[in-house]
Each structure stands twice: as structure tokens, then as C-alpha cells.
Image (cartoon, helix red, strand yellow):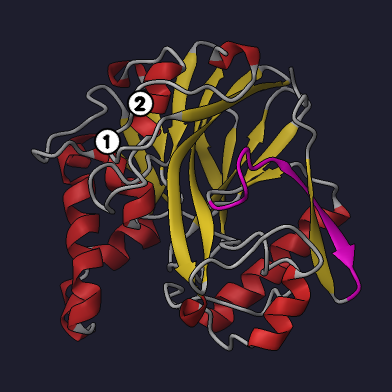
Amino acid sequence: MAAGAGRASLAAEGAGGTAPVVHAFTLGEARITVLLDGHLPLGTQLFNGYDDARAKEVLAQGLHRLQDDALQIPVNGYLVERGGQKLLIDTGTAQLMGPGLGALGAGLAAAGVAPEAIDTVLLTHIHPDHAGGLIAADGSAVFANAELVAAQREWDFWHDDAILAGVPDSSRGFFDMARRSVAPYADRMRLLQGESEAAPGFTALELPGHTPGHTGFMLDAGGEGLLFWGDLIHSTALQFALPEWTIAFDTDPAQTAETRRRMLDRAAADNLLVTGAHLDFPALGRVLRQGDAYAYQAAPWQFGL
């Protein structure tokens, strides 16, 4: 069924061999299409402080299941069309992270949008599952006419040679991929300072911890709002119930947990509509308080149709 109908759409295979899946809905003045890039296995060994008994207790309350000691987590990106503007939030993995991923570009095509039609790309941060889709296999820019927007702190972190010199060899590949992904956009890059306008209708929110410049974007769609929170949550299955559990890819685990609690408290108190890069597709819902922790309430499939 066509993306414009707001349902899942399956089309030709993407770069990673997965069929593109999209879900579109309307919020106020905006048309938002969630683009599934694919899934990543998040192994239990990647959770800091993982406790098998506690995890099984939480998982037993829902439908998520471990497969080979891993949870399959989605990688989502977003097309936002508003007032003639076509904007992307994050770009998926392209060819950087292997089979089972790389379908975001084909999903964009299934939504009827060519890469050259994108006006702006907002990056929540410069990890390969968010910035990898910026470049083609030959290193050229995929979005030939787009302005690239990210936090100044994020750009500075990945381009700091002193930081690079001090990281273990296992982390150097992340720096290389980050630098290569944004390099073709150097002459049309806009760097944000603090809470500021990222694009018309979008306010950037500092959400540090996962990376130093990790950023969320609040959309004001003409009286209706949506928080795009990037990697505030990696596992829908575990981290609402266990918000103190961080993962190996968090640059500052303590700050990650503090930022998560602060934003989940805000989302619950303000009854915010939220979406995230690793929330279960189609990744739209609200946060509920549940004792000292939280729960995720997914929006009905028909929301915004």
C-alpha cells in the first residue's frame, strides 16, 4: 500500500538487502514518514550492568524475545514535509553496517521523494547508523542540495585529533566513519549552539551522554508537537523499565542515564508525543510513569491518517 496511505509499504530491496518499510502520518501542518533502515542485533553483553534475571523478568511482561542473547532493534529515520520543505532527520546506515540494513534510501524512494529534493538534513549525532546514509559508496554526497545541521559540540568531538589519539583502536573506526560521512557537506554545514532553531518549526534540544553533542529535535507542527529524541532509548524492551541500563556505545554512561531520566520525566509530565531512532517501528507513542521507572505506550496504527 502506498506510503501516502499511512500504512507500511514494501518495495524493491534496499542497499542492505532489506525491503523498505515506511509509515506515514499527519501531525498538524506536517506530514511525517518513518523510514525503517533495518534492524541491528543488540547483544546482552553490550548493556552496562546487565542482569539476566532482571532482564527476563521485564521481558516476560511483554512480547520482546532474546534471540542468540540479543534483541533486534530498529534503525529509523524520518522524512518531514511541511510548508513545501522536505527535511530528513538522520539518514540510516547505507553500506556501512552490513546486511539487514541500508533500506532508508529505498524507503525514501518508496515515499516518492528523490535525494536531491531534500532541503535539510538534521543529525541527532554522527554515529554510522545515523550519518552513514549521507554518502554513497564512492564517498560522494547523497543529498546534493541539502544543508546539513548538527550540534557544534558533536562536530568538534568527532573532529578533535587529540581525542582521536587517545581512544582505543577499536573506536577509531567510528571517528573515521563520522568524518567521512560529513566531509562532502563541509561547505553547507550549519552547526548549532545549545537550544536553538534547527530549521523552521524545529527546536534543537541538548541531550548529551550518548555522545557529547547528542541532540533531540522538537517539532512545532502548528499547535501539535513531536519530540524526535534520537538515541535516548536503544531498547524499547528494557530501558523504559530499567532506565539506568546504558550500553557500550554511550560515551558518558552516567550522563546518558541522567539525560534519559530528565527527558522521560518531561515527556511523561507534559504528555509529549515522542519518536526515536531505535523505538519499535513505527516508533510513535507516549511515555508513562510506572513507579520509579517508565513505560512506553505505542500510538495506534491509525494515528494521524
Residue at figure coordinates x 78%, y 58% from the top left: 266
Q: Is residue 61 above or below residue 77?
A: below
Q: Is residue 281 left or right of residue 74?
A: right
Q: Is residue 76 left or right of residue 51?
A: left
Number of numbered callouts drawn: 2
> For numbered disc 2, what is the local secondary structure?
helix
Residue 221 located within the stretch drawn in magenta: no
- Mark 1 residue type: Ala
The numbered dot on residue 15 is 1
Q: Position of residue 41 (x, y in %)?
A: 45, 62
Q: Is residue 45 above or below residue 161?
A: below
The numbered dot on residue 106 is 2
User: Is residue 149 in view from this perspective?
Assistant: yes
Q: Are marks 2 and 1 in contact (CB under 8 Å)?
A: yes
Query: Where on the picture, by quarter, is residue 106?
Result: top left
Graded by Cα atoms within 10 Å as few (under 14), some (14 to 19) or many (20 or more), the crowding at tag 2 reads many
> For numbered disc 1, what is the local secondary structure?
loop
Residue at figure coordinates x 67%, y 79% from the top left: 244
